[in-house]
Amino acid sequence: MKVGDRVRVTESVLVYHHPQHKKEPLDLKGLEGKIVNILNDWRGRPISPNLPVVIEFENKFKAHLRDNEFEVIK
């Protein structure tokens, strides 16, 4: 898994900040996007975030996910 990989969400993940579904739950399961960042340091210091992988979906919508909630598409 690396920045730029195409991925598909395999687990049910509810988000409430999608621009077209404000204040309503949206399940990301089945959506495809690409990895834009993997968080492992902050200002040069190592960190261990709960949701380390930032995935960008259509319309510039981004979500932070765990590495077990998606699969890489070949």
Image: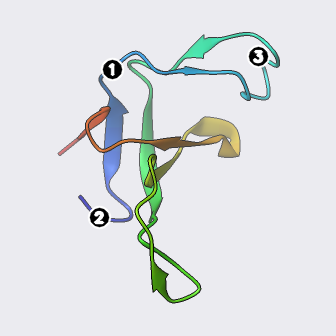
Circle number at residue 42: none
Which element carries disc 2, helix, strand or loop?
loop
Q: Residue at x 33, y 41 (%)?
A: 7
What is the x, y in percent for residue 55?
49, 47
Mark nearer the N terminus (3 vs 2): 2
Question: Disc 2 marks which residue?
Answer: 2
Q: Nearer the viewer, mark 1 or mark 2?
A: 1
Amino acid type, residue under disc 2 in the picture: Lys
Q: Position of residue 19 (x, y in %)?
A: 79, 29
On screen, residue 57 versus residue 11, left or right, reads right
Q: Is residue 11 left or right of residue 29?
A: left
Query: Which part of the image, by quadrant, shows the C terminus?
Result: top left
Is residue 36 toward the left or the right of residue 30 in the image?
Answer: right
* Residue under label 3: 21
Residue bearing the label numbered 1: 11
Q: Closer to the camera, 46 or 63?
A: 46
15 is higher (above) or lower (below) than 37: above
